[in-house]
Image (cartoon, grey):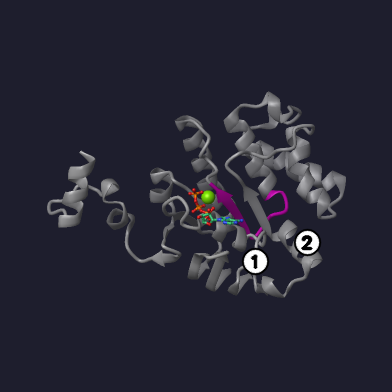
Amino acid sequence: MIHLRNITKSFGQLQVLKGIDLDIVRGEVVSIVGPSGAGKTTLLQIMGTLDRADSGTVTINGTDISRLGQKALARFRNRQIGFVFQFHQLLPEFTALENVMIPALIGGTSRKEARQRAEELLAFMSLTDRATHKPAELSGGEKQRVAVARALANRPAVVLADEPSGSLDTQNKEELHRLFFRLRDEMQQTFVIVTHDEGLAASADRTIHIVDGRISALPMSDIMPDVAPETENPSPEQQIIKTYLA
Ligand SMILES: Nc1ncnc2c1ncn2[C@@H]1O[C@H](COP(=O)(O)OP(=O)(O)OP(=O)(O)O)[C@@H](O)[C@H]1O
Ligand SMILES: [Mg+2]
């Protein structure tokens, strides 16, 4: 459903992505992990049509997005891609319900239909009794769930989330993660989630490691030995690093 082929991206002299190939199928929860500055956000922005690659192709639901002009691209993004950021980015002057309705209204859906969809989504997230609250009157976890509802308003092909639980406490974090999997199970919703959360990465259907501008075939435990599961025979490298971290 999403196909990335040989994606490269530089900022000036800095080559951030050095040839990324990635295929994502419908109903998959894919997590993207890697050190700070590895290019995770850059890759997500390219996948989400918010930024353009220097070379390579991004195909989403059969559309090669590099062929779309500005206007068609904005329309495509509105219809096919939902975004969830680390900080909710809800519009403060609108209620939870109105925030969730906005993408549908922008996409030309009638007010009535947009409202119905928004109410359904808020109900799915157990937020019906918060629908008329403005963001300032919601907890951090509630705001993030409203942001997820907003991302789903137009039944997008994929929801792209950049550290969605990065600013939440443990309980809200776990609730948000469960919500992602419930949406996958009940709506076949596809997610690509950049995360530093080991628990989320571990429970994803697939975890992509970005290291030095490329997708690493190595498991996380080889890249970050300190998170390696205890093994009978740690490698010499793991031994050394363990010693340093002890
Ligand atoms: N618009 C930009 N102009 C110049 N450099 C940029 C720009 N955006 C990102 N970079 C650089 O590209 C590299 C990758 O950035 P990116 O935001 O993708 O990292 P990341 O993997 O998301 O890191 P983090 O985990 O800290 O969020 C960084 O070195 C960053 O400073
Ligand atoms: Mg980032």
Q: Can residue 195 be found in the magenta stretch?
A: no
Q: In this view, does 164 lie to the left or right of 221?
A: right
> Where residue 157 sits in the image (x, y, percent)?
64, 60
- In front of the other: label 2 or label 1? 1
Q: Quadrant of the N terminus?
A: bottom right
- The total of numbered circles placed on residues is 2
How far apart are the two marked residues, 2 and 1, measured between alpha carbons? 16 Å
The residue beneath circle 2 is 75
Q: Give the range drawn in magenta.
A: 152-162
Quadrant of the rendered image containing residue 45: bottom right
User: What kind of residue is marked 1?
Assistant: Arg
> From where the camera sits, is residue 241 visible?
yes
Local secondary structure at mark 1: loop
Residue at the image point whose x is 72% and y is 75% from the top = 67
Disc 2 residue type? Arg
Task: Establish if 38 lies above or below 72.
Answer: above
